[in-house]
């Protein structure tokens, strides 16, 4: 007897994820009944049952590159989440990859049915969700030095005398994903004391001890630009106090650089949107504030890493005032790079705003092309695609947008926006009845310690970032003549036709479509001797 009961159908491996038939719950909010057209929109889930008898389960075929993270999703019946044990073992001397098991759970426990479960807690944690069935994510990361070829593994699930063994055949392709992206992924981290105090982090000293865990975790998800990581007394520097009077901030700045963040956003000087008011402090203080930073950054050789943002999502009618505000910064510290975000840019903005993050719903290709011709760097901003009521495919496709539309960065306006406690307040699609800004929560706080817990949406974004890397490596291989040009052209046409319009509120692409493209790219890179590209 097969000790791994499959739910209602056969199962098969597809590009590092376990897929079952459309009769399963794959891709739906996990507490919801099936809804027409949603079955292919999200993560496929493999259903297993723990039993007392052993047997030979089907082998699941997985494919991935070195330095890639593959996600496996299981729904277990016949077992509680507590005291459940999971092991990964190798066969015939196969080198073990890095791996971790986390429970997928609702946050909060009374999460409304329309929202996807996206909380992730380590198996064995007191935060596991007790209600059956048990939903697990097994995360497998192939190390950079993992040998190419086929390797066999067993995932063993056990609770007391009941157990299940899922066999895996892992094909590791002969190329390596780079550790970092060639573009910028900016995240805004909020060290608000009133938010962290709920979780036992009640002082600045406590935040200083905790912050490295947040910064290090963000780097694991390929986020390489950071803002708002330390509270800073902007008014004191604006009034002439030396930057060296704030060694804690400077120490954190050094840590950010050492962790490999490509960019950091400087603390903003308040008041830019009120520039026309009499006695405006921004206009009076900008000449002291930014030169102070500029001199310090010059001494460290970090001028090219710093970004300045003082106005977010301005109305196009205010663009002349935006130009004036950023012009004052450029006059005070010409070497500093500036950024903003909002609707499509105007030609005048490109003179003083170096980076513009355009909101996907307002993307106008002619205006973006004109800005690029003037030297402005264009990032993407698409926060509604990663709202908690959106299926995972919407988050993953962001990586494909970045490649297809030639963006050089992505803006996450927040990763831990917690004015309301996410453990007690459900998300809301409107501004009443819940947390409207949950789309700015990709890290949950451990309610006992405040330490960061990743979310399933953050995992999905990284999946999209890695897809982006596949696309870049394929383009590089083609430019070097390492792939069949006719096959490459056909694949590029398929990619172009599969990636939806950037402005769509509900992108018409499915998870299996993106997986199929990733498989085809991986096969082509592997045949090209892709290890030379990584």
Image (cartoon, rainbow, N blue to C red):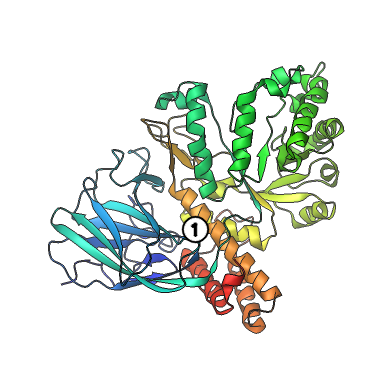
Density class for disc 1 (Cα within 10 Å; few <14, some 14-19, many ≥20) is many
Residue at left offset 76%, top offset 39% = 303
Q: Answer yes or no: is residue 213 visible.
A: yes
Q: Is residue 400 above or below residue 426?
A: below
Q: List the residue tagged with mark 1.
A: 393
Pick the front one: 162 or 395: 162
Q: Judge left or right: residue 230 versus residue 296.
A: left
Viewer-side residue, 480 vs 27: 480
- Residue 275 rendering spot, x and y as whole percentages: 80, 25
Relative to 268, is 382 on the left or the right? left
Place of residue 429 in the rendered image (x, y in percent of width and height, measured from the top left): 49, 40
**With respect to residue 81, does 282 lie above or below?**
above
| Percent of width and height locating residue 45 | 35, 61
Which picture quadrant has residue 198? top left
In the shown orientation, is residue 161 left or right of residue 428? left
Label total for image: 1
Q: From what the image shows, is residue 53 above or below residue 244?
A: below
**Residue at the (62%, 69%) spot, across then down:** 533
The reply to whether residue 507 is in sight is no
Quadrant occupied by the C terminus = bottom right
Residue located 68% across and 20% down the image: 245
Residue nearest the viewer, comparing 181 with 458: 181
Secondary structure of residue under mark 1: helix
Task: Quarter of the image for the N terminus: give it.
Answer: bottom left
Q: Position of residue 445 (x, y in %)?
A: 43, 35
């Amino acid at each position: 007897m097969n000790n791994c009961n499959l739910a209602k159908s056969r199962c098969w491996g597809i590009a590092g994820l376990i897929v079952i038939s459309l009769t399963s719950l794959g891709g739906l909010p996990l507490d919801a009944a099936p809804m027409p057209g949603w079955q292919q929109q999200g993560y496929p889930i493999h259903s297993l049952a723990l039993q007392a008898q052993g047997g030979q389960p089907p082998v699941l075929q997985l494919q991935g590159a070195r330095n890639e993270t593959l996600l496996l999703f299981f729904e277990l019946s016949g077992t509680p989440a507590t005291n459940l044990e999971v092991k990964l073992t190798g066969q015939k001397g196969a080198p073990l990859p890095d791996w971790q098991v986390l429970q997928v759970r609702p946050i909060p426990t009374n999460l409304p049915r329309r929202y996807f479960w996206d909380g992730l807690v380590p198996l064995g944690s007191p935060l596991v969700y007790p209600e059956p069935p048990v939903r697990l994510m097994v995360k497998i990361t192939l190390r950079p030095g993992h040998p190419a070829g086929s390797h066999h593994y067993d995932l063993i699930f056990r609770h007391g005398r009941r157990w299940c063994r899922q066999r895996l055949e892992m094909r590791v392709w002969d190329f390596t994903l780079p550790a970092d992206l060639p573009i910028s992924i900016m995240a805004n981290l909020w060290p608000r004391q009133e938010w962290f105090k709920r979780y036992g982090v009640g002082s600045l000293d406590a935040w200083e001890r905790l912050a490295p865990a947040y910064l290090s975790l963000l780097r694991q998800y390929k986020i390489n630009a950071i803002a708002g990581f330390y509270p800073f007394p902007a008014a004191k520097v604006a009034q002439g106090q030396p930057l060296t009077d704030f060694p804690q901030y400077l120490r954190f700045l050094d840590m950010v650089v050492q962790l490999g963040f490509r960019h950091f956003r400087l603390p903003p000087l308040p008041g830019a949107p009120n520039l026309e008011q009499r006695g405006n402090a921004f206009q009076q203080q900008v000449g002291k504030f930014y030169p102070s930073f500029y001199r310090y950054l010059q001494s460290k050789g970090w001028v090219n890493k710093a970004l300045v943002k003082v106005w977010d999502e301005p109305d196009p009618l205010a663009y002349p005032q935006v130009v004036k505000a950023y012009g004052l910064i450029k006059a005070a510290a010409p070497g500093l790079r500036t950024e903003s975000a909002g609707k499509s840019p105007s030609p005048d903005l490109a003179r003083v705003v170096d980076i513009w993050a355009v909101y996907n719903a307002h993307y106008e290709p002619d205006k973006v092309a004109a800005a690029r011709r003037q030297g402005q760097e264009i990032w993407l901003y698409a926060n509604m695609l990663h709202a908690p009521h959106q299926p995972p495919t919407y988050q993953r496709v962001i990586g494909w947008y970045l490649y297809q539309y030639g963006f050089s960065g992505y803006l996450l306006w927040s990763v831990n926006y917690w004015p309301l406690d996410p453990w007690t307040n459900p998300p809301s699609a409107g501004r009443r009845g819940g947390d409207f800004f949950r789309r700015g929560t990709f890290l949950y706080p451990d309610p006992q310690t405040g330490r960061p817990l990743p979310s399933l949406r953050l995992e999905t974004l990284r999946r999209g970032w890695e897809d982006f890397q596949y696309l870049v490596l394929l383009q590089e291989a083609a430019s070097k003549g390492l792939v069949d040009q006719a096959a490459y052209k056909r694949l590029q046409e398929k990619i172009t036709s599969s990636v939806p319009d950037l402005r769509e509120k509900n992108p018409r692409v499915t998870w299996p479509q993106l997986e199929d493209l990733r498989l085809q790219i991986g096969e082509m890179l592997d045949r090209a001797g892709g290890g030379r590209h990584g």
